[in-house]
Image (cartoon, grey):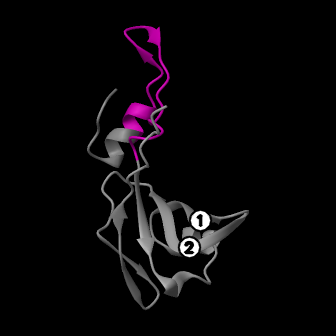
Amino acid sequence: MVSLKSNDQTKKLGAITTFLNIPVTVSPHNSLNNSKGVIRSSDIRCCSEEEMVEELSGVTLARRIKMRRVEDRIQTDTVFLIFDSTMPPSRIRAGYLTLDFELYVPPPFALL
């Protein structure tokens, strides 16, 4: 694993096909090259997940968190976001709104 500081370094490393005459492949790590978090606001209830990905800078995935009530799944005002950088913003600008961004902490595994 290699940590790089600039896009220029990333491009140069990505172009490498051999190292000491040994064929190599270079690919970004799936989970270490992004950051995950949540935003909460009733003002974004009408926005679709696709709109959030298109309109919010740096967002690669948006999923609305749902609650289970008996047999129904109810949408909440909380949205899970994945950013394309390792350093997430502390706030997100969505139109006229400024929303606080909190790091995502996954639920702990249940012990059996």
Q: Residues within 10 Å of mark 1 (few under 14, many from 20)?
A: few
User: Residues at badges 1 and 2 in contact (C-beta under 8 Å)?
Assistant: yes
Amino acid type, mark 2? Thr
Magenta span: predominant SS is loop
Residue 33 against residue 82 in the figure, above or below: above
Q: Position of residue 27 (x, y in %)?
A: 48, 32
Q: Quadrant of residue 8?
A: top left
Q: Position of residue 65 (x, y in %)?
A: 56, 64
Q: Secondary structure at mark 2?
A: strand
At 62% from the left and 84% from the top, the residue drawn is 46
At 37% from the left and 40% from the top, the residue drawn is 10
Query: Which label sits on residue 67?
Result: 1
Q: Secondary structure at mark 1?
A: strand
Asked if the stretch drawn in magenta spans residue 30, the answer is yes
Q: Nearer the viewer, residue 87 or 107?
A: 107
Q: Nearer the viewer, residue 15 or 32?
A: 32
Lateral position of residue 8 relative to residue 24, left or right: left
**Magenta-drawn segment:** 11-33
Residue labelled with disc 2: 76
